[in-house]
Image (tube, helix red, strand yellow):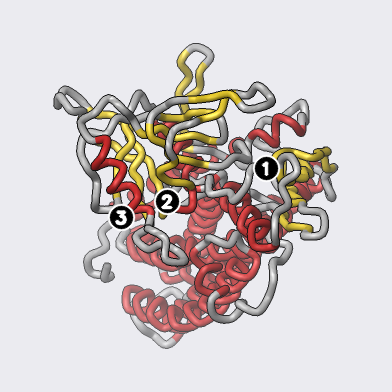
Amino acid sequence: MTVKKTGKKTFFIVVAFIAVFAVTAVMGIDKLFGDNRTTYVKGVDDIRLGIDIKGGVDVTFGPAGDFDADADQLASATEVIKTRLASLGITDNEVYSDEKSDRIIVRFPWKVGETNFDPEAAVKELGEMAELTFRKGTDTTTDEDGNTIPSGELVLNGDDIESAQMGYMPTEDGSGAEYIVSLKLKTSGENGEKSGSEKFAEATSELAGTETPISIWMDNTMISAPRVNDAISNGSAQISGSFTAETATKLANQINSGALPFKMETKSFRTISPTMGEGSLDAILLAALIAFCFIAVYMIVLYRLPGVVAVIALCGQVAGSLAAITGWFGFMNGSTLTIPGIAGIILAVGMGVDANIITGERIKEELRTGKSLDASIKIAYKKAFSAILDGNITNVIIAVILMGAFGVPDSFFSKILNKTIFFAFGATAEGVVYSFGFTLLAGVICNFIFGVFASRLMVTSLSKFKCFKNRKLYGGDEK
């Protein structure tokens, strides 16, 4: 948007947007029906705190019974658990395997609102450590221990599924709509075997139009049994039923992370005390608030009207960082907040202050050369942008590398970097470093949105008011 197109109303529109955004990012949006609370937008109270702040659980998984897992199977199971943690937004975690004892050790923080610190309940949050299978029919039998197990012919297992996601489509009679789970099957098999798409095409061709469903099992528990209406040969399918948004999402997550090569069980679990404690969080937040107040006074005294705008923009930047952590933006998952994550927010705020200082000084310089107020503002923002861009791009690169090197394996940055730069390195301690990179990246992006573009709109808009045309308000001499 150019200076000429920026009117007087723009300032109020931008401030209103920042205010609404900040309130929803901090408070969230939810509705209470009796004892049931429905959350539409998460607020700061819904942020999951890291192990360093709140503590968590240490759990050891291993193969069930006398199964002896090889190195590849153990590595595959480890990746599945990491994927489950990622799908839950638990980025502060440690997952590593011990090949000698056939064990997988997982450490992750308590969930939001946890008060009784029950490690057994926390383990259940990861979902069942079970094998995923698709079978013809719903027939069962009893094993030697008296357990009921599925006996239908195996159609697919978790390895045959490419991905699953929750969807929404009209009902068959057209009277409404329903939640579904959409499946995408693998189109290539391993070691000369048939692909998931081919196996599914054969099974659905056989069962189409019959009363025999294809049941979906997590170990010995049937989680769904949809009927086959038509043969499916395009590698995709929809599971329909009495789903809610929550149950459809849960089933999709179970399918996405259900490709365990063997059944697992919990061998041991214990609680983990916070390494720094919630008292450290309170101290850091208080220090950050005090520092922000001093920065606000400094910016207003030194840069006057642009300083006031800078403070408003910084409020928007902090709100944006919090919104990224809570998952406010629908296109991205939230993240666990750790002490290094808070440091990332503070560092990004420092970059935001630096951007506003550069711009404020540029406006002063242009005014001192005798240029008009409008011309000084326009030229100052244009000249300052390249310096701000260079400084922030370096931080973006650093944040991306940290997120790729220390992030969960299936994240976008990890997939790219692990196939190029980091392919020769093993797993690392992921959570706290990833949290720092995440909040730093979110803060830098918010700096561009609020500290550069929103600030420019607000300053340009205010300069249109007669009462704000005094050059002294921008650091210049009255003329």
Q: Would you say the residues marked 3 and 1 are in contact, meaning their CB atoms lie under 8 Å apart?
A: no
Whole-angstrom CA distance, mark 2 to mark 3, is 50 Å
Q: Earlier in the sequence, mark 2 or mark 1?
A: 2
Q: CA distance from mark 3 to mark 1?
A: 59 Å
Mark 3: few/some/many CA within 10 Å (<14, 14-19, 20+) = some
Question: Which residue is farthest bottom?
Answer: 369
Q: Position of residue 346 (x, y in %)?
A: 65, 60
Determine which of the numbered discs, if any, sits on residue 10 in the image.
Answer: 3
Location of residue 34 with respect to 198 vertically, above or below: above
What amino acid type should be assigned to the residue bearing mark 2? Answer: Ile
Q: Mark 1 sits on what residue? A: 264
What kind of element bears circle 1? strand
> Mark 2 falls on what kind of element?
strand
Q: Which residue position is annotated with label 2? A: 161
Which numbered disc flags the more N-terminal residue, 3 or 1? 3
Residues under numbered marks 2 and 1 in contact, where contact means CB atoms less than 8 Å apart = no
